[in-house]
Image (cartoon, helix red, strand yellow):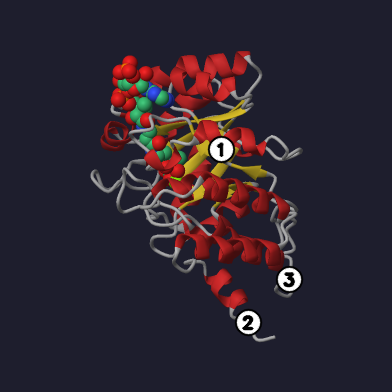
Amino acid sequence: MTLPMEFPAQSLPARVRIHEVGPRDGLQNEKSQVPTDVKAEFIHRLAGAGLTTIEATSFVHPKWVPQLADAEDLFPRLADLQGVDLPVLVPNSRGLERAQALGATRIAVFASATETFAQRNLNRSVDESMAMFEPVVAAAKEARAHVRGYLSMCFGDPWEGAVPVHQVVAACRRLIDMGCDELSLGDTIGVATPGHVQELLSRLNEEGVPTDRLGVHFHDTYGQALANTLAALQHGVTTVDASAGGLGGCPYAKSATGNLATEDLVWMLAGLGIDTGVDLDKLVATSVWMAGELGRPSPSRTVTALSHKES
Ligand code: HMG
Ligand code: MG
C-alpha cells in the first residue's frame, strides 16, 4: 500500500469517520447521465476500499436533479452491503416516504443558512424550508432512523456574500432542536479559511451544540479544504465529508466546485497516524476507473500523484 511517512501530531483524534459523498454530491452535478450500473459499481468499490458511510443518492424531485432520478432503481442494488451505512438525502415528506419504502434507515435533510440559496435549492424561504423539514425529522426519528442535518452556505454565499456567524449558529440550533442527530457544516462554495472554521465551531459550542454532533463538509474551490479540515480536527471534529476523486458541486450554486477529495484527506490523515479504515490504493483505483467512466481525469492531487507514480 502507498502511504506517507507517519508523524502523529498532538491533540488530534485517533480515528476519523469519513462520510463519503461522491455518489450523491459528486454525481448530482454530472452533465451526462451516469448509468445506474456504474453508480452501483462505484458504491460497491468504495465499500471495498473500506469506506463505511457512503451517501448513496437523493430522493429529491427528479426534475430538480435528473442525475439522481434513478434512486428507486439504485438503492435496492446496494442491499448486499452489510455493515455499510447508506444515508440518502430527503427534502420533504414525499422524499422520506420514497426512501423508507426502500428500507433506508439513515436520512439527511438539507437546509440553508441564507435566504437566496434556500429559494434556489428548495424553492422556499429559510423559515418555510425549516417548516418542511420538521415533520420529516419527526417521522424519521419515530421510525428510529438516523437523521443528519446539512446546512449550506455556512461560510459565504455567492449571491449574498459574507454570512454572519450568528446567522449560521441560529440555523444550526434550529436543526438540532428539530431532532437532527448530527449536523454537517457545508462550505458550499469553498470560501472558508481555517480561522473562520474554528470560530464557527467555538460559537456553536457556546450555544450548546457539542463538537461530537458536528461534521464538516468542505468544497475545494479555493484550495482550502484540507487546511480547513485540519482546523476542524484540532477543534475535535471526527466526522469529515469527502468525495472520492474530488467529484462534485451543486447544480443550484454554480460556484460550488468539487468537494474535498477523499484520497487527499486519507493521505493527510494517514501521515498524521489517524485511522480511517480506508485502503488508499483501492480507493485511487476506484477513482481512476470512475474518471474513465466520466471521460475526464480526477481533480484530486493524490489520485493524480499515485496513478502516475514510478514503479
Ligand atoms: P417544489 O417544486 O417546490 O415541490 O420543489 P412541491 O412541494 O411544490 O411539489 C411539487 C410536485 O413535486 C408535487 O407533484 C410533488 O409530489 C412532487 P404534483 O402533486 O404536482 O404531481 N415532489 C416530489 N416528487 C418526488 N420526490 C420528491 C418530491 N417532492 C415534491 N421528494 C423540492 C421542492 C424540495 C422538492 C425541490 O426544490 C427539490 O427537489 N430540491 C432538491 C435540490 C437538490 O437536491 N439540491 C442538491 C442537494 S443540496 C447540496 O448539494 C448541498 C450539500 O452538498 C451541502 C453543501 O455543499 O452545502 C448537501
Ligand atoms: Mg456539497
Question: In what quadrant of the picture does the C terminus appear?
Answer: bottom right
Q: Secondary structure at mark 2?
A: loop
- Whether 75 is drawn above or below 138: the answer is below
Q: Secondary structure at mark 1?
A: helix
- Labels 1 and 3: the sequence-earlier one: 3
Q: What label does residue 7 carry, if any?
A: 3
Q: Secondary structure at mark 3?
A: loop
- Whether 297 is drawn above or below 235: the answer is below
Q: Nearer the viewer, residue 248 or 270?
A: 248
Q: Residue at x 43, y 36 (%)?
A: 69
**Residue 125 image-quadrant placement:** top left
- Specify the amino acid type for callout 3: Phe
Q: Nearer the viewer, residue 186 or 288?
A: 288
Q: Nearer the viewer, residue 152 or 39?
A: 39
**Residue 251 image-quadrant placement:** top left
- Specify the amino acid type for callout 2: Lys
Return the x and y of residue 160 as percentages of the image width and height.
24, 43
**Residue 148 image-quadrant placement:** top right
Q: Would residue 178 be found to the left or right of residue 158 on screen?
A: right
Confirm or reject: label 2 Cβ below 8 Å from ligand 2.
Answer: no
Instruction: Work out whether residue 7 can be spotted.
Output: yes
Q: What label does residue 74 carry, if any?
A: 1
Return the x and y of residue 3 as percentages of the image width and height.
72, 72
Return the x and y of residue 219 as percentages of the image width and height.
44, 54
